[in-house]
Image: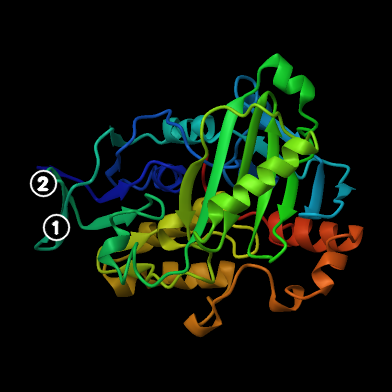
Amino acid sequence: MDNYDLIIIGAGPAGSTLATALEGSDKRVLIVDKQTFPRDKTCAGWVTPAVMDSLAIDTQDYGADRTLQPIRRFRIGMMGQEPVENDHGEIVSYGIRRSEFDHYLLQRAHCDKVLGEPVRSIEQEGGNWVVNGRWQAPLVVGAGGHFCPVARLLGDGPGGHETVIAAKEVEFEMTPAQANTCKASGVTPELWFCRDLKGYGWIFRKGNYLNIGLGREDNYKLSDHLNHFVDEMKQAGRIPSDLPGRFKGHAYLLYNHAHRPLVDDGLILLGDAAGLAYTESGEGIRPAIESALLAATVIRSAENYSAKSLQPYGDAIAERFGKRARQNENGWQLPQWVKAPLAGTLMRSHWFTRKVVTEKWFLHQDLQPLKAAVQ
């Protein structure tokens, strides 16, 4: 049996960032993922300059042979009414393809990796965790997304009493004919809020790739809402009329909806496995990256991997993202005062859609980049 200091379950941005951040700590790290990389990943896929800064990514180098779509404007509206466009002047975000981005981050992680093998068992033996009967370590890190097997070891885990956000989306490379007829602009992602304010749809063009999707706070009539949104966008010429393939579904937890413990003896959860997606927008990439950087700091200095020694990670998450709402305060990401007849008027306001929806909820420009030693 191979021995490690920690085993990371999940090779996405959270897992690979943690492994990279622990380089030089003399800890032997193993990453395990059921997929081989590069792999297809359903995600709208945008990252702010803060993410690139925290990861010390040279955008010119990254964009030389990968999709990196600069974003300077946003088109925001409520379904059934005219949208507003706001020009931010400078680059405020980037569009990426997750298949490329995740592979890039994983390649930077210099540690042992086992890809293409699902986790079938995690069992405790003495002071160690044994994964698949093959590898053991005193610490197992859950970074495998909403259905991460490590999350099942803490609290209810996936399938418990959690309010899950359900989304469906498709991403494809447009043909020349589709690209010519598509009115969506790469520098201007489109966000369309459902009239009941329980979710939103999006159109995001990244170079010659187009991503279309819709997410809501539950599965109730999700396909109906999506089909209605897609039909409206086709009629308006925002997207091609001949979309290929079918929309893929996925689920995640918003920060204020999640009640999973973040740590236990020899266990720690990162990113979507911990339910860290931003409550206002559903973005999960930046929280995943930052949770990994915060965890790396704690793991480096922890005397052991008891829940008490790992609790500073939970404290750091609360300080960075705020305290989670109590269970009886659960609600969709929009504040209650927005869920009123005033919402339609607010979504027609350039000030509100720019300062609140875009800069605060989606870009988090009031939150400085998290600095960490990721080189």
Q: How crowded is mark 2: few (under 14 residues within 10 Å), some or many (20 or more)?
A: some
Q: In this view, does 249 lie above or below 69?
A: below
* Residue at the farthest top position: 176
Q: How many labels does the image show?
A: 2
How far apart are the two marked residues, 1 and 2, measured between alpha carbons? 8 Å
Q: Residue 271 carries which label?
A: none
Task: Please state if 229 lies on the left or on the right of 331 as rendered.
Answer: right
> Which amino acid does the dot numbered 1 rest on?
Glu
Q: Which mark is residue 133?
A: 2
Q: In which quarter of the image is the N terminus?
A: top left
- Residue 70 appears in the rendering: yes
- The residue drawn where x is 66% and y is 55% is 200
Relative image position of residue 217 (x, y in whole percent):
55, 63
Q: Residues within 10 Å of mark 1 (few under 14, many from 20)?
A: few
> Could you say which is closer to the camera, residue 268 or residue 325?
325
> Which amino acid does the dot numbered 2 rest on?
Gly
> Could you say which is closer to the camera, residue 349 or residue 315?
349
Task: Name which quarter of the figure residue 107 lies in.
Answer: top left
Q: Mark 1 points at which residue?
A: 123
Task: Please state if 285 lies on the left or on the right of 363 as rendered.
Answer: left
* Marks 1 & 2, CB-CB < 8 Å contact: yes
Task: Please state if 328 lies on the left or on the right of 181 as rendered.
Answer: left
Relative image position of residue 36 (x, y in whole percent):
34, 30
Q: In this view, does 1 lie above or below 282?
A: above
Secondary element at tag 2: loop
- The residue drawn where x is 69% and y is 65% is 197
